[in-house]
Amino acid sequence: MPSITRTRNWSVWIGATLVVLGLVPLAGSASATGPKVSTVIANRSGIVFGPKTTEAHSFITQVGSAKRRCQVAQGTPLAALKGTGVVFHLKDFGRCSMNTSASAGLFLDKLVNTTNTGTSGWTFKVNNRAGTAGAADPSGPFGSGPLTTGDKVIWFWCVFDANWACQRNLVLVAPTTAATGSSISVSVRAYDDAGTWVPAVGARVSLGTAKVVTGQSGTVAIQAPSTPGSYLLKAVDATGSSRGGQRAPSFPTALAVS
């Protein structure tokens, strides 16, 4: 059984040096282009940031007490997170440098004032699949290429189960338009690390003031607001405790009601 060893894309190595990523990129650090990526951050209480779409630019940070200059490649989950402006801490498990390939060992250790503890901590998924490479690996989250425009990245608090897998993340399948007061059919799926989904039982779907919990089918009917406008459909876990690892909430889905 793994114990403080590398497990998937978020890992813990003993004896690593904690480093801090500055809020502002150093001069000349950003690339001219980068894929436009949507990022959400969810802690044990739910979504605390996003979704926000930013360009995943390359950037430079200073690492360790020697303030070694290290460059992170564009199109990485870490570059997308940097674009949000949210503060995070890193550890360096290699010897990062201005060569982006040397920065593959950078590891996110702290986000939104919450630090990894034991075998629980921050991880990311891209388009509902857990990354198999590090967040700063220039080969991309799956080792097959960088992020592309339109990708969705969720950072969430992972609590390993007995098989050393993180809890699933929820995804809404819903229309984008609806008539005022009409009944809308909404499905919620729960994706595992490999990107395989099952119907999400016990997910709370909300739309305005309306809230409905899914049953075995993962599908519910929810009433559209009576007032025209733009609304957000959301889905959160209504079954698990934060200690046991709630399923990560869905990206909100925009619904135009007219």
Image (cartoon, rainbow, N blue to C red):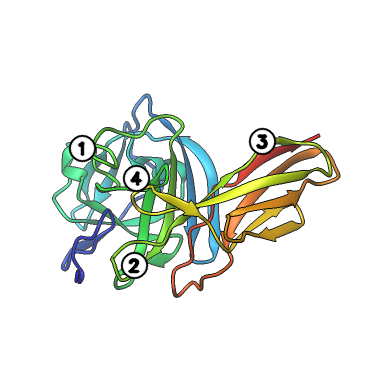
Secondary structure beneath label 2? loop
Q: Do residues under tags 4 and 1 come within 8 Å of each other at their CB atoms?
A: no
Per the model, the C-alpha gap separating discs 4 and 1 is: 12 Å
Residues under numbered marks 2 and 3 in contact, where contact means CB atoms less than 8 Å apart: no
Q: Position of residue 250 (x, y in %)?
A: 54, 51
Distance, label 3 to label 1, CA atoms, is 40 Å
Three-letter amino acid code at the position of disc 1:
Thr
Given this view, does label 3 or label 4 mark the residue nearer the observer? 3
Residue of label 4: 78
| Residue at point 49%, 72% (across, down) | 242
Q: Mark 3 highlights which residue?
A: 176
Mark 2 / mark 3, whichever is N-terminal: 2
Residue under circle 2?
160
User: Is residue 17 or residue 195 the one in the foreground?
Assistant: 195
Q: Are marks 2 and 4 in contact (CB under 8 Å)?
A: no
2 or 4: tag closer to the N-terminus: 4
Quadrant occupied by the N terminus: bottom left
**Among numbered discs 4 and 1, the one appearing first in the sequence:** 4
Residue type beneath disc 3: Thr
Crowd rating for badge 2 (residues with CA inside 10 Å; few <14, some 14–19, many 20+) = some
How far apart marks 2 and 1 lie (CA) works out to 30 Å
Which residue is under mark 1? 100
Sequence-earlier tag: 2 or 1: 1
